[in-house]
Image: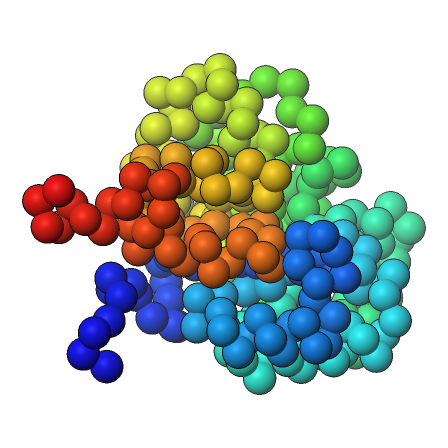
Amino acid sequence: MTFAPPPRSEKPRSAGITAMIDFGPDEMGWTGENGLRDLMACAAPFIDMAKIYALNAILMPEDAVKANVAIYRDNDVTPYTGGVLFEYAYLRSEVDDMLDHVERLGVPSLEISENYVTLEPNARHDFIARAAGRGFAVIWEFGRKNPEEPFDLDEVGAMIQGAMDAGARHVILEQSELDMLEDVSPDDFAKLSGQSWFPDALIEGDPYRFPRQHGEIIRQFGPEVNFANIAAGQCYRLEGLRRGIGRAVDYAMFRNYGL
């Protein structure tokens, strides 16, 4: 193809990762089997991972979840279960049962979070290592849904390093934590990209503030920033924003032409 769009890195990517959030049949993108096939036909090259939202891995019919998981994997998209599923299992003392269920669904990756539960470092590392030891690609999410104060970069860096040492592949930065940090300490927010762990981190976006918030993050951290929680109906437009297409990034693609 000689007449091509502005360039972007291709899969498999170590930067510029887009992790979609699969809400199921929902206003944010109808991801029943047929809808998901249509989405993959157009956007699979731009989607790296897909989170099965909250408790959908046990709330939706098992056959429907399995069908979607197979479609993702056939299109080189890594599905993973969200951290709320882990927290629910933890509170019920059923983490091993949860791992059995996720394995039965054919999901190769999972998120371990502490949005509402609090784990001591040894327990956190044990759960990460236990899941990794069973062959899952583990994502650890830092942060609370309702933080009370902005996080300290050095403290979080040590927590992330511990999680990675225990076997986590990536870390997700909780949207609420990022909102508070940007609000209260914008200088620290601007320093995120300078942290040694930042290349392994995914910034959790707010689907309800798309595309403005996402455009601001791209302008601040660059088009190859890693994003999580991108709704199905937003993945294609996010790819455009990364390439400098759209009002939210002021059509940055034209800067290469001196405009």
Q: Is residue 176 left or right of residue 106?
A: left
Rendered residue at 62%/68% (across/down): 79
Rendered residue at 60%/63% (across/down): 50
Give coordinates of residue 37: x percent, y percent: 63, 78
The residue sitting at the top extreme is 184
The residue sitting at the right extreme is 92
Give coordinates of residue 200: x percent, y percent: 42, 52
Classify the position of the C terminus by image quarter: top left
Q: Is residue 139 visible?
A: no
Q: Is residue 7 left or right of residue 149?
A: left
Between residues 164 and 63, which one lies in front from this camera angle?
63
Rendered residue at 49%/15% (across/down): 184
Between residues 92 and 14, which one lies in front from this camera angle?
14
The answer to whether residue 97 is above or below residue 188 is: below
Quarter holding residue 6: bottom left
Q: Is residue 78 left or right of residue 244?
A: right
The answer to whether residue 173 is above or below residue 184 is: below
- Number of marks in the image? 0
The answer to whether residue 140 is above or below residue 215 is: below
Give coordinates of residue 83: x percent, y percent: 70, 51
Rendered residue at 40%/27% (across/down): 189
Quarter holding residue 206: top right
The residue sitting at the bottom extreme is 74
Q: Is residue 206 visible?
A: yes
Give coordinates of residue 203: x percent, y percent: 49, 44
Here the colouring is rainbow
Classify the position of the N terminus by image quarter: bottom left
The answer to whether residue 81 is above or below residue 226 is: below
